């Protein structure tokens, strides 16, 4: 070993002739030389003498181990090589490999998706059958205060006309009581005015040219025969005249009615007040 930091090649041309280690056989030397030449030992540039010897010894041990392994491998009898696969076997292997490489559909049974059990709250309740809306029933107005159906219908027309004018309940009672006294709540035509009989009527009177529910005279300026034969027009003509009387709301019924009618029997209206009140109450409900 040299002191310049390079390892001596024990098998090189510069090997000292005074080495005392055993000389291996020719085959072993050839193998060992090839392995050592392929193995590079590294050592620091300025190694210490003790460490250099340790590295060389370790490398030699590794080389001897490799020689033993190589001898074991070389000494094993050669196994007879198997026959080469035939062309048919190779073709089958190629086809099998190709088929395995192909994507195959899964034959596993599909896992059924569990159906969530419907909770009682989630169960759709049957739709309730919509009940038909009850038809709006029109209240049947029945005759009261001894009137018949025709008279009650005429009283109803008087009340409806007064409501359209916005007249208070007291004015409606006065109007119904006046019609009770004048015409018994029947739409009169006049025998003196044949024209009046050409309009709907329920009776015929002979009191001059007085016509209609309030026995109003066309000659006095109440209106035409045709107008006065209409219960709605006749009622509104009466109530318009009543509204012009100062303080009519506080007057006795007979006084208020007489102020409009100028009748020969001024006190006759008062007798119908209670019946007129009952009729208006039934109509207004």
Image (tube, grey):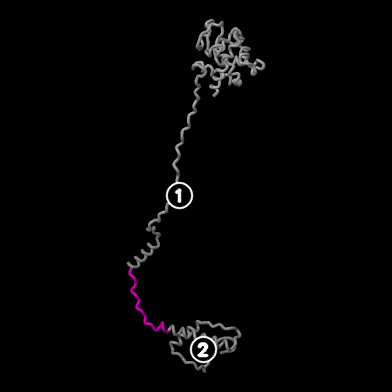
Magenta span: 71-86
| Towards the viewer: 171 or 191 | 171
Image-based side of 129 in relation to 183, left or right: left
Question: Is any atom of residue 227 visible in this view?
Answer: no
Q: Quadrant of the C terminus?
A: top right
The residue tagged 1 is 119
Q: Quadrant of the N terminus?
A: bottom right
Residue 165 % position (x, y): 60, 20
Q: Quadrant of residue 254?
A: top right
Above or below residue 25? Residue 170 is above
Q: Residue at x 38, y 64 (%)?
A: 97
The local crowd at label 2, few if under 14, some if 14 to 19, many if 20 or more residues have their Cα within 10 Å, is few
Of badges 1 and 2, the one in the foreground is: 1
| Towards the viewer: 116 or 73 | 116
The residue tagged 2 is 10
Residue 118 % position (x, y): 44, 49
Above or below residue 254? Residue 191 is above
Secondary element type, mark 1 = loop
Q: Is residue 23 magenta?
A: no
Residue 65 % position (x, y): 46, 84
Q: Give the alpha-carbon distance from disc 1 to disc 2, as whole Å.
A: 92 Å
Most common SS among magenta residues: loop
Q: Residue at x 33, y 68 (%)?
A: 89
| Towards the viewer: 190 or 117 | 190
Q: Residue at x 60, y 18 (%)?
A: 171
């Amino acid at each position: 070993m040299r002191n310049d930091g390079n390892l001596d090649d024990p098998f090189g041309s510069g090997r000292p002739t005074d080495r005392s280690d055993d000389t291996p056989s020719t085959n072993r030397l050839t193998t060992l030389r090839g392995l050592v030449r392929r193995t590079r030992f590294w050592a620091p540039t300025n190694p210490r003498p003790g460490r250099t010897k340790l590295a060389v010894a370790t490398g030699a041990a590794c080389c001897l181990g490799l020689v033993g392994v190589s001898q074991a491998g070389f000494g094993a009898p050669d196994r007879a090589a198997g026959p080469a696969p035939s062309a048919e076997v190779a073709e089958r292997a190629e086809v099998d490999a190709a088929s395995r490489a192909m994507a195959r559909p899964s034959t596993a049974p599909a896992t059924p998706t569990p159906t969530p059990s419907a909770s009682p709250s989630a169960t759709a309740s049957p739709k309730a059958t919509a009940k038909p809306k009850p038809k709006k029933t029109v209240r049947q107005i029945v005759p009261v205060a001894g009137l018949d159906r025709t008279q009650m219908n005429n009283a109803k027309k008087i009340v409806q006309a007064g409501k359209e004018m916005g007249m208070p309940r007291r004015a409606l009672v006065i109007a119904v009581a006046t019609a009770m006294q004048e015409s018994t709540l029947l739409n009169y035509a006049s025998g003196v005015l044949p024209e009046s009989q050409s309009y709907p009527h329920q009776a015929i009177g002979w009191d001059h040219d007085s016509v209609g529910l309030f026995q109003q005279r066309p000659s006095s300026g109440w209106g035409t025969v045709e107008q006065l034969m209409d219960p709605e027009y006749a009622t509104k003509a009466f109530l318009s005249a009543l509204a012009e009387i100062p303080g009519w709301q506080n007057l006795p019924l007979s006084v208020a009615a007489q102020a409009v009618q100028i009748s020969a029997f001024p006190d006759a209206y008062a007798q119908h007040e209670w019946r007129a009140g009952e009729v208006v109450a039934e109509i207004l409900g």
